[in-house]
Image: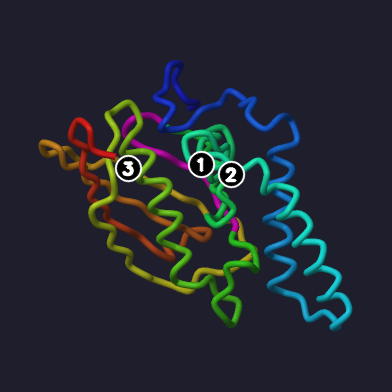
Amino acid sequence: MTGPEGLDRRGWNNEPGEQGGPDFPRMIEALRLLQARMTGASPPAETVTETSETLEKLAAALEPFTVPEAGQIVGHRTDLPGRCQAMAPPVHIEEWDERHALGHVTFSRFYLGGNGAVHGGAIPLVFDEVMGRLANTGRPRSRTAYLHVNYRKITPIDSRLRVEARFEREEGRKRILAGALVDGETVVADAEGLFVALKPGQP
């Protein structure tokens, strides 16, 4: 199943975006790789100094292009995993409609909590991203009001995990959704979320 034509852009979008040019996704992936490599590294002092100087130069190079939130690219590229938000684990959506979404995610070492397990705080980021976008797909915008996550098993880093989300029901402005994170045939975490449709004029 693929995304239907005319899908609400607050959901998922198959059409490549143009913001940032063709290398913007490459830049974000390079940043994600840097985060993972930095987390797993134990470099000598001189490499730390050189890397710090390089990162400071890169930050300075981007500073003149700072724009208001509405004009930034990160968070608005619905065609890319995580909408280019490097903080969030990159979820790749494979199929969806207004009632369900299915995809996969791999937590890099950047999300390591310890002993090969994903940090517990990173898992709700996946559920909030996928369930929140599903809650808005084909519907007026809503915000997360409640997200309950059950940690069933250890979630491993560097493993391809299945992500599932489904729209359970709607009660007035309330939208109730459920999700699961699966390693092979094992549910490592599941979640229930409440999303509330915004009133006119609400940010």
Q: Earlier in the sequence, mark 3 or mark 2?
A: 2
Q: Which residue is under mark 1?
A: 75
**Which amino acid type corresponds to the residue marked 2 in the rendered image?**
Cys
Q: Is residue 100 magenta?
A: yes
Residue sitting at x 71%, y 29%: 21
Residue sitting at x 55%, y 49%: 85
The reply to whether the C-beta atoms of the residues labelled 2 and 1 are less than 8 Å apart is: yes
Q: Quadrant of the C terminus?
A: top left
Mark 1: few/some/many CA within 10 Å (<14, 14-19, 20+): some
User: Which secondary structure lies at badge 3?
Assistant: strand
The quarter of the picture where residue 142 lies is top left
Disc number placed over residue 166 in the picture, else none: 3
**Which amino acid type corresponds to the residue marked 3 in the rendered image?**
Arg
Residue 86 locus on image (x, y percent): 59, 53
Residue sitting at x 23%, y 53%: 145
Q: Earlier in the sequence, mark 2 or mark 1?
A: 1
Q: Which residues are magenta?
A: 97-106
Disc number placed over residue 84 in the picture, else none: 2
Residue 176 locus on image (x, y percent): 22, 46
